[in-house]
């Protein structure tokens, strides 16, 4: 296989705020693999709180390039098994990019669309939420008024006023999801509960820190709303743990290492009777086109990463008013724009 890569700075249309950071740009690395003339693409973002930089990923990819160039490609699963021991510790984002590029190539060669192969016929394709950054009630209401959408994910923190939900309900009947990004404790969550119930919140994502299972278990006793693991669900091995403490898991390809382990996580979560969600971070249509391949097996999805950008470097799967629109092409359906190829 031939290896190319494209470092790129994703620019957010607006400042994006969660409980522990705010940003306007996001460095990312687009990986291109070519096998027998067929190009496949994957993405690895350099998220600051995961302590992996763009330069580190580029250096690691250069280190792997001789192996990849001499590798006799057959299936994405086999390639993942070969390279995961080299990348799984600290480089799951790069592993994901390589794995997704391999799935892209494999789908094109075999005239397959991955999302059709792993579809669950018992489920309707879920609507993607649109994320509202943390802020005052007025700031969050203004974001909603600026972007009519069928489902919103609200970023909240420990200091956010619960009345924000009531203010938001005055301006929209759309479904509401809550993401506290591990900022709550039992006291704060208990204070929020009446507001969550009154506002008809659909789910609560990662209310407590990873190691705070005591508060989580206590809160689940009084909360009828599904609680979703995000920070607590990083990789395949976490699914068993999450089944004991959560109602659902949020699978992120870059955290678990790509589509190959994500598909296994979907299968295991079904066996454990967990509800399923997939999520994104700040990423382009390259990453979104990969993660939406498992959407046909999900209950919920957060696929708005590319919508939040002002300079998406690719086209592929689109999210239009919450609906996932797959391109009529094989593989992941990704095409890079000319700007990034310069």
Image: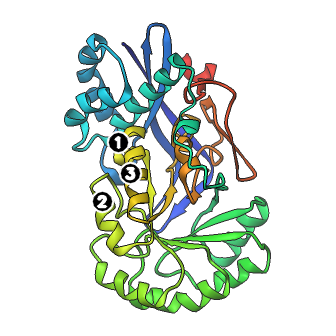
Residue 30 visible from this viewpoint: no
Residue 61 shows which numbered tag?
Answer: none
Disc 1 target residue:
257
- Mark 2 → mark 3, Cα distance in angstroms: 9 Å
Say which quadrant the N terminus sits in.
top left
Rendered location of residue 187, percent (x, y): 41, 91
Residue sitting nearer the eye, 334 or 144: 334
Give the residue pinned by disc 3: 265
Q: Which residue is mark 2?
A: 238
The C terminus - image quarter: top right
Locate residue 297, reporting x and y percent.
Answer: 54, 51
Mark 2 residue element: helix
- The mark that comes first in sequence, 2 or 3, is 2
Work out whether 308 lies above or below 132.
above
Tell me the distance, in whole angstroms, between the alpha carbons under discs 2 and 1. Answer: 13 Å
Q: Position of residue 257 (x, y in %)?
A: 35, 42
Label 1 vs label 3: CA separation? 11 Å
The residue positioned 44% from the left and 58% from the top of the image is 270
Mark closer to the chain start, 2 or 1: 2
Camera-nearest residue between 164 and 240: 240
* Nearer the camera: disc 2 or disc 3: 3
| Dot 3: element | helix
Figure quadrant of residue 16: bottom right
């Amino acid at each position: 296989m031939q290896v190319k890569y494209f470092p790129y700075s994703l620019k957010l249309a607006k400042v994006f705020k969660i409980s522990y950071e705010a940003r306007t740009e996001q460095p990312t690395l687009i990986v291109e693999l070519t096998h027998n003339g067929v190009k496949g693409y994957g993405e690895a973002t350099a998220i600051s709180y995961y302590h992996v930089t763009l330069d580190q990923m580029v250096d690691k990819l250069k280190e792997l390039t001789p192996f990849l160039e001499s590798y006799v490609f057959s299936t994405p699963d086999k390639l993942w098994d070969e390279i995961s021991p080299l990348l799984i510790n600290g480089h799951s984002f790069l592993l994901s990019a390589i794995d997704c590029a391999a799935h892209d190539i494999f789908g094109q060669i075999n005239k397959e669309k991955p999302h059709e192969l792993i579809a669950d016929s018992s489920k309707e394709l879920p609507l993607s939420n649109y994320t509202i950054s943390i802020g005052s009630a007025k700031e969050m209401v203004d974001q909603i008024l600026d972007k009519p959408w069928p489902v919103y994910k609200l970023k909240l923190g420990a200091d956010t006023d619960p009345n924000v939900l009531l203010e938001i309900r005055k301006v929209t009947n759309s479904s509401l999801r809550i993401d506290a990004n591990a900022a709550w404790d039992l006291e704060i969550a208990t204070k929020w509960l009446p507001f969550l119930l009154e506002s008809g919140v659909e789910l609560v994502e990662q209310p407590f820190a990873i190691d705070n299972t005591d508060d989580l278990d206590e809160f689940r006793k009084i909360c009828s709303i599904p609680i979703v693991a995000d920070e607590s669900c990083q990789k395949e091995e976490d699914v068993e743990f999450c089944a004991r403490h959560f109602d659902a898991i949020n699978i992120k390809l870059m955290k678990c290492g790509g589509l190959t382990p994500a598909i296994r996580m979907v299968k295991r979560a079904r066996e454990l009777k967990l509800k399923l969600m997939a999520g994104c971070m700040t990423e382009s249509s390259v990453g979104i086109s990969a993660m939406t391949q498992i959407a046909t097996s999900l209950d919920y999805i957060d696929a708005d990463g590319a919508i939040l950008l002002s300079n998406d470097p690719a086209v592929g799967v689109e999210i239009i008013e919450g609906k996932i629109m797959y391109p009529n092409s094989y593989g992941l359906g990704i095409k890079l724009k000319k700007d990034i190829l310069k």
